[in-house]
């Protein structure tokens, strides 16, 4: 199993800038929103937050439930590729 620090910033989809990369959080900032993989309780979740609401608690889940890091990262990457801010 991989960890957040195993992945380099070079694997970010076009239009997304790596923001945080540590043992508990991995995040990317796009033109309109932020995508986050975060360790919560006994697993990982992925979610998106509109940039206009970065300080708010509103977030759109990208995983149905807690998963492992690779599952959360896959959901986040799929979302970023579908919502490519560079396009």
Image (spheres, rainbow, N blue to C red):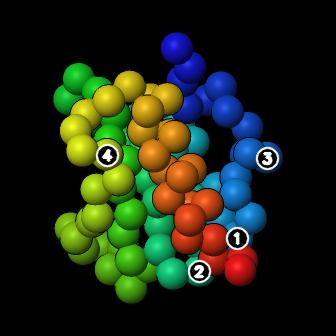
Q: Is residue 16 above or below residue 2?
A: below
Q: Where, quadrant-wise, is the C terminus in this rendering?
A: bottom right
Q: Is residue 64 left or right of residue 17?
A: left
Q: Secondary structure at mark 4?
A: loop
Mark closest to the chain's N terminus, 4 or 1: 1
CA–CA distance in space, label 3 to label 1 = 12 Å
CA–CA distance in space, label 4 to label 3 = 23 Å
State the mark number for residue 10: 3
Mark closest to the chain's N terminus, 4 or 2: 2
Q: Are marks 1 and 2 in contact (CB under 8 Å)?
A: yes
CA–CA distance in space, label 4 to label 1 = 22 Å
The answer to whether residue 84 is visible is: yes
Answer few, some or many: residues within 10 Å of disc 1's Cα (few below 14, many 20 plus, some between 14 and 19).
Answer: some
Mark closest to the chain's N terminus, 3 or 1: 3
Answer few, some or many: residues within 10 Å of disc 2's Cα (few below 14, many 20 plus, some between 14 and 19).
Answer: few
Mark closest to the chain's N terminus, 1 or 2: 1
């Amino acid at each position: 199993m991989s960890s957040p620090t195993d992945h380099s910033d070079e694997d970010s989809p076009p239009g997304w800038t790596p923001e945080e990369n540590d043992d508990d959080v991995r995040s990317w900032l796009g033109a309109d929103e932020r995508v986050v993989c975060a360790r919560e309780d006994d697993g990982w979740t992925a979610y998106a937050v509109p940039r206009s609401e970065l300080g708010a608690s509103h977030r759109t889940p990208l995983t149905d439930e807690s998963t492992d890091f690779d599952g959360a990262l896959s959901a986040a990457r799929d979302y970023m590729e579908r919502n490519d801010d560079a396009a």
